[in-house]
Image (cartoon, rainbow, N blue to C red):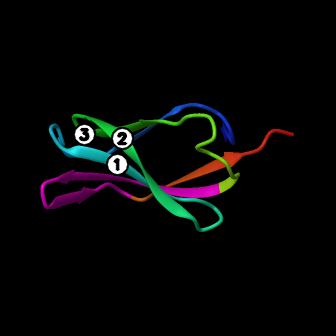
Amino acid sequence: MIFKGQTITLSLDTGRDLTGWEGFILYKKSNGIHGEWLATITGDTVSYDIAEGDIDIAGVWHVQAKATLGTEREYGKLTVVEFRTHL
């Protein structure tokens, strides 16, 4: 279980070695607002260290790995993450 305000590392496996590419994690919050975080790529994993304040709304979020190399784009699978609030 992941809570709003918690600091964790979000890692998404892409199934393809993306060494040398620039990584991002795209997100769509439960309220429909979307954006992206600059991420780190290690082999086939795209990771982002979620900082305090990044998860500012509870609910179901959609996240997806994205990698770019010049004009090339690669996307990972769409993943659903639920962020909860403490009682």
Q: Quadrant of the N terminus?
A: top right
**Depicted 15 relative to depicted 77: above or below:** above
As shown in the figure, which amino acid type bears the numbered disc 2? Ala
Task: Please state which of residues 65 and 68 is positioned toward the viewer in this rendering.
Answer: 68
Real-space CA distance between mark 3 and mark 1, rounded to the nearest whole angstrom: 13 Å
Point out which mark residue 24 bears.
1
Which SS type dominates the magenta stretch?
strand
Q: Is residue 57 left or right of residue 18?
A: right
Q: Quadrant of the C terminus?
A: top right
Q: Residue at x 21, y 53 (%)?
A: 68
Secondary structure beneath dot 2 equals: strand
Real-space CA distance between mark 2 and mark 1, rounded to the nearest whole angstrom: 5 Å
Which residue carries the number 2 mark?
39
Q: Quadrant of residue 43?
A: top left
Q: Is residue 73 left or right of residue 35?
A: left
Query: Which region of the structure is painted magenta?
Result: 60-77
Q: Residue at x 65, y 34 (%)?
A: 6
Task: Please state which of residues 71 and 77 is positioned toward the viewer in this rendering.
Answer: 71
Q: Residue at x 51, y 63 (%)?
A: 34
For marks 2 and 1 on the same chain, the one whose residue lies earlier in the sequence: 1
Q: Is residue 87 left or right of residue 52?
A: right
Task: Please state which of residues 80 and 30 is positioned toward the viewer in this rendering.
Answer: 30
**Depicted 63 relative to depicted 15: above or below:** below
As shown in the figure, which amino acid type bears the numbered disc 3? Asp
Which residue carries the number 3 mark?
44
